[in-house]
């Protein structure tokens, strides 16, 4: 399994807009494109406390990750929603992502297939 961790730091005053976009557009589009979100939340302790959205996605491999993100990014519903949300300015100060390969630990952790 490949896990992708994504971190979004909204522009000042835009957290509500980002949460609205995520819950009303992003999550339904993830479902549409067969993308599995494992967790989502706000950072409560650490850098960017209460001003950062972090979520984790699960993919079978990097090829699946790239294929599904490619479909998401080119989805006209996504492009329209993002353009609409950014009419008053940029939503994000920073976006970070990383992938984590759970392979070496799957057996010990009893990972789900």
Image: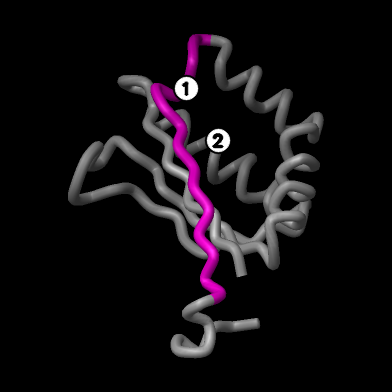
Query: Which segment did they paint magenta?
Result: 88-103
- Camera-nearest residue between 48 and 13: 48
- Residue furthest front as drawn: 104
Crowd tier of the residue under label 2, counting other residues whose Cα lies within 10 Å: few below 14, some 14–19, many 20 or above = some
User: Which residue is located at x 50 percent, y 37 percent?
Assistant: 20
Q: Main secondary structure of the magenta part?
A: strand
Q: Where the N terminus falls, by quadrant?
A: bottom right
The percent coordinates of residue 42 (x first, y second) are 33, 48
Q: Is residue 95 magenta?
A: yes
Relative height, residue 20 to residue 113 (above, below): above
The percent coordinates of residue 34 (x first, y second) are 75, 59
The percent coordinates of residue 41 (x first, y second) are 38, 53
- Camera-nearest residue between 87 and 67: 67
Judged left or right of residue 82, residue 102 is left
User: Which residue is located at x 41 percent, y 48 percent?
Assistant: 54
The answer to the question of whether label 1 and label 2 lie on touching residues, with beta carbons closer than 8 A, is yes
- Residue furthest left as drawn: 45
- Camera-nearest residue between 56 and 15: 56
Q: Which mark is residue 91?
A: 1
Viewer-nearest of discs 1 and 2? 1
Question: Which quadrant holds residue 75?
Answer: top right
User: Which residue is located at x 69 percent, y 53 percent?
Assistant: 65
Where does label 2 land, which residue? 21
SS type, badge 2 = helix
The percent coordinates of residue 109 (x first, y second) are 45, 86
Crowd tier of the residue under label 1, counting other residues whose Cα lies within 10 Å: few below 14, some 14–19, many 20 or above = many
Question: Which quadrant holds residue 80?
Answer: top right
């Amino acid at each position: 399994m490949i896990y992708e961790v994504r971190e979004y730091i909204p522009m000042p005053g835009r957290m509500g807009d980002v949460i609205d976009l995520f819950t009303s557009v992003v999550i339904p589009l993830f479902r549409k494109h067969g993308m599995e979100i494992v967790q989502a939340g706000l950072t409560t302790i650490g850098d960017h406390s209460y001003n950062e959205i972090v979520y984790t996605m699960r993919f079978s491999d990097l090829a699946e990750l790239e294929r599904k993100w490619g479909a998401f990014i080119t989805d006209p519903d996504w492009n329209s929603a993002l353009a609409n949300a950014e009419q008053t300015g940029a939503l994000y100060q920073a976006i970070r992502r990383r992938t984590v390969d759970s392979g070496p630990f799957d057996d010990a952790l009893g990972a789900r297939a």
